[in-house]
Image: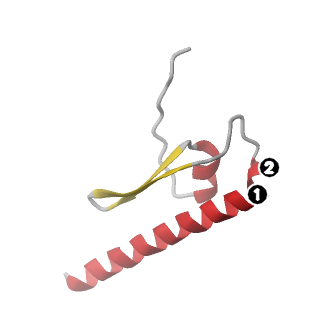
Amino acid sequence: KEKKTIIFVTHDLNEAILLADTIVVMMPRRIHNTLSVPFERPRKAEDIYASAEYKKLYENLKKEFDDIQQYIADEEVSL
């Protein structure tokens, strides 16, 4: 078997967690953070979404995005 790499761009946190093994959180002009997704494959959405691990990862990602939005808003104000 050959290993394949796919770059998938989404703004949907649920989709990112379900599909990715690694999530790269981007900011304007740079990478903000890289997170590993701890779920084994194959994955079933109903199993993942019910877990405490998923909820923690989702909240961490949501905070990352909120921080980035605040950074962008602050940058626009300083321009």
Q: Looking at the image, is 70 positioned above or below residue 30?
A: below
In the image, is 45 to the left or to the right of 5?
right
In the image, is 79 to the left or to the right of 61?
left
Measured from the top left, where is residue 10 in percent x and y?
51, 52
Count all numbered tags in the image, as a single digit.
2
Dot 1: within a 10 Å radius of its alpha carbon, few (fewer than 14), some, or many (20 or more) residues?
A: few
**Amino acid type of the residue tagged 1 in the rendering:** Ser
Residue sticking out furthest to the left: 79
In the image, is 15 to the left or to the right of 68?
right
> Of residues 42 and 38, which is closer to you in this image?
38
Q: Are marks 2 and 1 in contact (CB under 8 Å)?
A: yes
Q: Looking at the image, is 9 positioned above or below residue 49?
A: above
Disc 2 element: helix
- The residue that label 1 is drawn on is 51
- Quadrant hosting residue 60: bottom right
Q: Residue at x 30, y 62 (%)?
A: 28
> Of residues 75 and 52, which is closer to you in this image?
52
Q: Residue at x 79, y 58 (%)?
A: 50
> Of residues 6 and 24, which is closer to you in this image?
24
- The residue that label 2 is drawn on is 47
Screen quadrant of the C terminus: bottom left
Disc 1 element: loop
Measured from the top left, where is residue 38 in percent x and y?
62, 47
**Amino acid type of the residue tagged 2 in the rendering:** Asp
Residue sticking out furthest to the bottom: 77
Residue sticking out furthest to the top: 1
Q: Residue at x 75, y 56 (%)?
A: 49
Distance from label 2 to label 1 (Cα)? Answer: 7 Å
Q: Residue at x 43, y 74 (%)?
A: 67
Colour basis:
secondary structure
